Amino acid sequence: MRRSFLVTPLVLALAASAAGAQQQQRRVIRGRVYDAADNHPIPGAQVVIQGTKTGVLGGPDGTFVLPAPAGALRLQVTYIGYKSTSVPVAASATSVDVAMALDALRLDELVVTGQATGISRRNLANAVSKVDAVDLAHTPTEAIEQTLQGKVAGAAITENNGAPGGGSIVRMRGTTSIIGAFTPLYVVDGVIVSDVSIPSGTNTISHAFGSAGIASDQDNADNRIADLNPDDIASVEVLKGAAAAAIYGSKAANGVILVTTKRGAVGRPRFTLSQKMGTSEILQKFGERRFNSLADAQAVFGDLATKYYQQGAFFDNESQLYQRPFNWETDASMSGGTENTQYYASLLAKQDGGTIRNTFADKYSLHVALDQRVGDRVKLGFATQVIRSSNDRGLTQNENNGTTLLAGIVYTPSFFDLRQHADRTWPVNPFTNANPIQTDAMFQNREGVWRAITSGKADIDLIQGDKQTLKFNWTGGLDLFTQKNNVFSPPELQFEQDGALPGTSILSFSQNLNITSNENLVHTYQGGWFSTTTSLGMQLETTDLDIDRTLTQNLIGGLQNINEGTKVTVEENRQRVKDHGFFAQEELLTFNQRLLLTLGGRADRSSNNGDPNHYFLYPKSAISFRFPSPVHLVDELKLRAAAGESGNEPLYGQKFTELTGTNMSGIPVYRITGLVGAPDLRPERQREIEGGFDLTLFNSKATLGVTGYEKRITDMLLTRTLAPSSGMTTEYFNGGVMRNRGLEVELNSFPLQRKNLTWNLHGNFSLNRCLIESLPVPAFRPAAFLNSNVFGSTFIEPGKSCTQLVGYDTTKTGDRVVDQIGDGSPSYRFGIGNNFTYHQFSLYVQVDRSKGGNLLDGSQLVADLSGTSADFDKPIKPGAPTGAQRGAWVGRYTKGYMYDISYWKIREASLSWELPQSLMQRLWGQTRSVRLQVSGHNLYTWTPYPTGDPEVQQEATSQAFSVPWDLWAYPSSRSVWFSVDVGF
Amino acid sequence: MNRIKILAVLLPLFAAAACGRDLNVPDLNQGSLNGLQSNPSASGIATAAQGLLVGLRASANDNVVLLGIMGREGYDLDPSNPEAPTQFYRNVSEDLAATIWGDTYSNMRQEYIILQALPKVPGLTDAQKEATRGFVETVQAIDLLYTIEAVDDAGAAIDVNPDPTGNPEPIVPKAQVYGRIDSLLDDALTHLAKGDAFPFNLGPGFAGFNTPASFATFNRAIRARADIFQKDYASALKDLAASFMDTSQPLTLGVYHVYSENSGDELNPIFDALPRQRFPHASLWAGAQLRADGSKDLRAQAKLKPVAPFARFGYTVSENFEIYNSDQASVPIIRNEELILDRAEAELGLGQTAAAIADLNFIRVSSGGLAPLPASYSGNLVTELLYNRLYSLMWEGGFRWLDARRFGRLAQLPHDVTGDLVFPRLAIPTDECNARAPDKPAGCAVPAGM
């Protein structure tokens, strides 16, 4: 159906408004906007008379009708994804055709500069990375962070382990905080969304963090940003440090990730349907020792070995835990719209089986976005996502009672068969208190999340003059989720049977509500030789989180309900944060649009600060200048510099010195907590200076951006471990200076660009050095879980790296010394992506490289001391130490277990084939595109790290806070997919 | 233009409303320490005083297990922490005393806060305040005793620093620490004498010792232990006489740490249900004396249970501990049996051999089911004393190690694996030393093993 009769009123309305402003109008220009490559019409392009604010939107067929003044003029035509084009219209002409070329290097892409303003990448003065949907979605992934891995210079993104359902840490430009928040702020369509990790409560089972507390940081929790559907994302902008992110004030010091979800576009309805199927497998097994003789077995297990040893027997118990699951994902979307109304809706259903049996992650989501024009001055937008995600991440990682799966494997000799008997009973493991294969089969660690992220926006044009505009903008919304965790450890499990209170059930309910409201006034002025954009804004943000847990032990009859046990423990933890800020910014674009000057700032207060009503000011400024064709082969050189400040506000509760209430045989008691809060606690202040240049080369075949930066973080939020004799353990305070210096390079190029063959090469490189410049207190170990010399600890020491690792080392003379034994941070990393397109085929390969950094291989350490490491008797490589030899390092030579975690990874690869138009038309006339694809994620890793994946994390903490360690993490996996995408 | 006018009015109003908002959010999860310090109430002080017993209880695990492992009462063979044996016996960690010091000084901080607040509390009578002071100072002395037991010659700080974030108090020599313990206990005794009733609940662990008068006999019992550790035998006899020591009462008479399954309470941390972590030292079963019928000392029979032998990390295990046989089993703080043995030790030290033999025999017969020693016993009475202290007080407070150290017999404790050593004391914890850098006390170093 043609909708031209709908178009007309809008055009008339715009024409009328233009008429009001533009008295001397004499003629009407008619035209058509089309793709220069294939002549297809481009619907919805914006056509503006250059030097004025007069303009129209093109219709679905690419045509436009623009009332214009007499005389020769130029039309500026812009459309997302195309290079902005300027065409001359002679004084006598009444029609014009506008051909637009694809903006492969995305120089005209709009990049955010304020709460409600943006500027084209061409002029941008900050190193903001923007990743668009096409680059995000080469392979299906669990979570949005994984789609960004290796694609953003300066962002270190590591998956905590291979458990299904996500769980990653994103660090922007080095270590930004020791005890404050260390992960970036996520903003989806203007709403601050929660990325909290809420542990499930498996600590009760594993005692990983000791027996106090139902849940701990070692419960292998996912982080909630994993709920977002990567397929709904139109683009991701990454503000890496204070210089760009000052507009987010005291929550921006760790960078800001701005996610824009897909919305409808003017044009005929479009439907897409995508079906993906695949599987995954673990990258590497831990391995088990083969016992060659009874004597070997007796040396480890004593008389127990005599009873169970069988010459030559080897049961690969570890492999019993793993599977190659069937994974699938179905996406469907629908979009379209008229000039007045645009809509987008999508559905996702996805099931990932874990590589450990009985683990999984499922996700279902519905996304609806609606944009509506009301009259000619008001534009309303609305988007909501409803997400259901659920998973079971099993029982892995650290333990203190033999319960976690891989612990059970390590404590059991390979000559003992742990498989279920034919009569469905389970062998009782005499070597430890758990049969991990039984645990894997019966233990449940279920998580279910319902989440709604709703955002709204309203743009009201208050003034639409020829020279100036004034726009009021409101953006806001809420992010509400409930998370339910059920941990069920049935009494039949061996470790439950052996325990004092067999059977454990833990039910946790968490509810989080984030509310964001932004109001902005944006004024633009178009002078003869300059234009200015002035914005004023105000932000209100609140977070309310409540976590309740009930633990029931000694389950009656093995029932899971929390009332069916004899010992009940309950916990509740609440957090509430209220923030309020003002924002002002002035942007000046002049000198023939070559010079951009920006000045701005935000004033913030937060309930987490000692004084919740004190405003902290975060200024920013930036400058960029473009030199067209400075030398041969260089199309343009842009020099840029930016400086800004942002904060990192304290976490909830850090300002309080508390008394904890507990009991002794039913008698209520108070205990001091050991934490000394700071009544005057302030946000950390990050001051960042960045500078660099961007080159556009070889007739728009390549762009190269180089950025150097220095971030100084003053007034650091610190916890100091106090002298035990003070009677308190930890003090929160502000002080000291930390510095990050780094270099980032981003390259995007088209070395080959023929009609049927293109090669797109893009890459990024980053390095960062973090240093503690000064401390107001003696050097100290943060109060982390692992902070002993035997396993190493971080050590906050002036003049040293923020992430240095300290522990036992052995001198040449054999003396034990405490020394620096490594560093948690890699020295540099880069990612390279290659995209070849030949006719209908395209091949994409992304390789990531990280160099340097250390990780404590706890898995190997424990296996060595347990006498069960695979290389206990014989080294893997000639000359390497055996497990037996390594075991003697413990307590003397921690450095030996601090492995180099450099790696090369084939992160993503895909091969796809677009069906030719002719074939599609023959199959079904309505089809717009059909693509078949095979792809893989994390296909291969080369690393000197001996056990599994060097990117794993036991605890999700700041790098400067706790030693990086790995103990029986859920093995990392590689996945392969086959997918069919249909558009019609 | 009307809309603009409306917005022009509304926007500043929005902004003003936001500015006026008070963002204060109180502590939603815990009580405030500040309230207890600046504005103490009678119930707040009572709740905090009860908390001292939870704080004291925190030390039980290390006193029994850690000191017990150092003195070869038991092994830590936790498969999940296979670094433990080398940390105790070979490459000894500097940080072994970290939890002991953390627990005791944390309690001392709370004691300091209560003592500071006590004069200001409305609603307590002077007699109640005296009783409270006597209680708090007694617990303080016990905390200090636990502190110095672990590090011995390294010395310790005798008070928490008033400002916890300020410079720590000096580390003073062992003798001064014991002097402080004695004076705290004596001062507590005078306050207890002026008190009528405790304005708080001491719980089931103090049944029979929950009035200032009966609590005073517990105070003296602790003083007697401190006397024995200082080899001040005359004072020991005097204090024992004022304690609850009574050969006509059960040997279990005394004061205990208690545990329960109530939500928020703790379970006995020493109880190892599986067991998988802690096992008795092989020498305990092997070294038990035989009774007339050829069976082992009743104490060994009651406290140890044979299991299928196995080896781990080079240590062979054939028994389990049976001392704490449930997750709610109480752990003694001090009890009658120890006091009788303390008296025997004091008598021996003062040359009152006959009295010492009589007390030892009382324990041998009533607790061990062994034959009494003849009055003319010619063997080494110290060996006999230490034997009885080991079997009577096994896995109750690290006595094997403390006793061997006091009598210079550490080198005679068993060495199981080649390279294993017995260490005479723990080092001052690393965080304590870091906080005092660069003037680290000598006690920060791990002493030579033997």
Image (cartoon, rainbow, N blue to C red):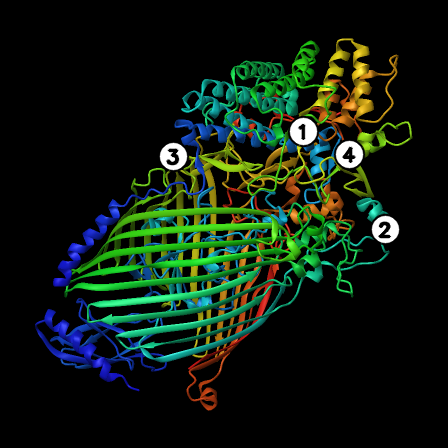
The secondary element bearing badge 1 is classed as strand
Q: Chain of mark 2?
A: A
Q: Nearer the viewer, mark 4 or mark 2?
A: 4
Tell me: residue A663, above or below residue B159.
below
Q: Locate residue A325, reporting x and y percent.
A: 62, 68
Quarter of the image where one finds residue A266: bottom left
Q: Residue at x 53, y 31 (%)?
A: B51
For residue B303, the mark is 4
Tell me: residue A67, above or below residue B249.
below
Q: Residue at x 65, y 21 (%)?
A: B152
Residue sitting nearer the eye, B401 or B172: B401
**Residues under labels 1 and 3: Cα distance?**
41 Å
Q: Nearer the viewer, mark 4 or mark 3?
A: 4
Q: Chain of mark 4?
A: B
Residue A635 visible in this rendered orientation of the protein: no
For residue A679, the mark is 3
What residue does disc 2 label? Answer: A307
Q: Locate residue A947, reporting x and y percent.
A: 65, 53
Tell me: residue A610, above or below residue A24.
above
Does the residue at mark 2 contact the one at mark 3 (Cβ under 8 Å)? no
The secondary element bearing badge 4 is classed as helix
Sequence order check, earlier mark of 1 and 4:
4
Tell me: residue B343, above or below residue B113.
above
**Residues under labels 2 and 1: Cα distance?**
39 Å
Q: Chain of mark 3?
A: A
